[in-house]
Amino acid sequence: MEKSDQTKGRMNFTIKLILAITTVVFLSSNLIFAQLGGEKDIVKIKSYQSMDKVVPGSEFKIAVQANIKNGWHINSDKPKDEFLIPTELSISGDTNFTIENISYPEPQQLKFAFSDNKLSVWEGEVLFGALVKTTKNLSPGDYPVIVKLDYQSCNNMTCLAPTSVEDTMHVIIAEKNAAVNEINPAIFQKVNLSYTAPTISNADKSDDVISSALKNNGLLIGLLFVFIGGLALNLTPCVYPLIPITIGFFGGQSEGRTSRLILMGLLFVIGLSVTYSVIGVVTALSGSVFGSLMQNTYVILAIVVIFVVLSLSMFGVYEIAVPSGLMAKAGGAKSGYYGAFFMGLTMGIVAAPCIGPFVLGLVTFVAAKGDPFFGFLLFFVLALGLGFPYLLLAIFSGKIKALPRAGEWMDAVKHIFGFILLGMAFYFLLPLIPKPYSSYILPVYMIIAALYILFVDKLSNNVRGFRIFKTAFSIILVAVAVWMLIPNEKTTIKWQPYSKESITSSQQTNNAVIIDFYADWCIPCKELDASTFTDPKVIKESERFHSYKANMTKSLSPAVESLRDQYKIVGVPTVLILNSQGKEVKRITGYVNAKEFYNILSTVN
């Protein structure tokens, strides 16, 4: 009996041992099988596109919906333990498609048996997003793009070897001008992803041309290039006001002496060069642009004061004279030298904000180089080129004094030039005057000046030729003033006031956008409004766009300062063209005619 019990006990122990070994082997084989990839379909994915078609060179969004098997989880893109493998979204199959940005969902922080700390993981259904960029040279067609999710899955006890799951989506590449429609809006509302903000890196190739010319040639050739660029700047609208001012100032006090004219002209050019040299040094030291002087209220007031001071000297209120010691050394010259120098300083500021892409490119190059002396040199030579024609103009303008019957006739000419300078003071003051009144200031002043010249100022009325000139000049002033006072409502682009919310709304609805950055004092801005934006073909083409005007007149406003920083606005006018994907495709600096602007708009989708 005792033997039988021992036998039974041994049999029971043997059975239990066999069962334990079998269980261990079974569990071990399952674990090994799983580690070798035997556990299938833990994660399944499905991909979605945000557009029904894609234009070459544009961006589109993709969303990847992942379903994780119950009881399992995958590591987040930033797991907390070093031995865990992060989840990564990628695409393959075609190098014409690259991921610009990825939006991973917010992970959960959970505790598991195999770790002492909470881990960053995803369970159940999660949604990934990505911004995909296409190359510009893609031909229209159907392109298979493989979406791949690399992951490591774990349960409460252990983790499997890293693996991946794929899904193929077909991207339709359309013609550049094809209409693109948004699809799957419900999916993409859940993805925290936006299109790339506008940049200026490839907006205007003129910067690259200027930088290349300065880098690839010697210093002398580079300086010659800058000097010629300065000469060319005289063709820009912002410089036009310098012509009557130069004639007015130099012609009003030159007394016809060539040596005096040359010296005054040189001082004018030196003053101009000092202003631009300061621009170059400040740009190099700060690494930022210096094209917004005329957007500062205090600078505007300073310029107005200078114009008023100079105009009063023309009316004989006082005489701008150099100190007696310097006057003796200069051979007894009486007046005008200080005035010529300060006029050059002022004209540099007047022309600086809107003299076109060349200066913008030069400013960018100097800012990147960061060399103050080099910045000084380049802008000094630029100003010499800009001022050289005005040296000749100063000499020529004074020659009218060599005409017969000087005396009173010269004082009468000074009065006319004084009115011109005073009119420029009013012009630059306009941005600081409330809108309802600003449009009347200049024409009313012109009428008053014309009546004064015609009926009050009797100087040299006995000179028949000059009397005819005065009469004709006064009549022209009155005619222009009346024309300015007549309401002239032209049909133009349907502009809306700029706001950040409106731009965001336009991008969300995939509309192309025009943003016109302007200022009330900017001459080419007014030219764009008068001739380019009122062209019927331009108006018709602009209907495809959402058009906004951004007022850059008062830079003391934090909102305007922020706007300038956001869009890297160096000067006005600047017109940005954004395509339907929100990417900047063209940046226009300075005046363009209606035909050129229409051609630019017609290429944007």
Image (cartoon, rainbow, N blue to C red):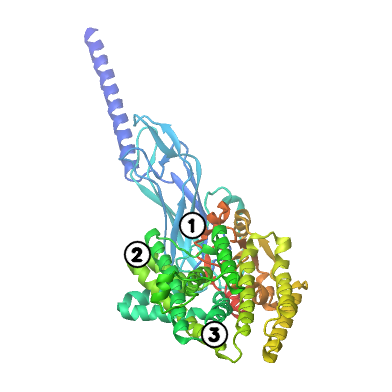
Q: How busy is the neighbourhood of tag 2: few (under 14 within 10 Å), some, or many (20 plus)?
A: some
Residue found at the far right of this picture: 486
In primary-sequence order, the first of circles 3 and 1 is: 1
- Whole-angstrom CA distance, mark 2 to mark 1, is 41 Å
Judged from the image, the secondary structure of the residue bearing numbered disc 1 is strand
- Corner quadrant of residue 407: bottom right
Residue found at the far top of this picture: 1
Amino acid beneath label 2 = Pro
Name the mark nearer the viewer: 3 or 2.
3
Q: Position of residue 563 (x, y in %)?
A: 55, 57
In primary-sequence order, the first of circles 3 and 2 is: 2
Contact, CB < 8 Å: mark 3 with mark 2? Answer: no
| Residue found at x 34% / y 31% | 115
| Residue found at x 27% / y 15% | 8
Q: Mark 2 highlights which residue?
A: 372
Camera-side residue of 399 and 135: 399
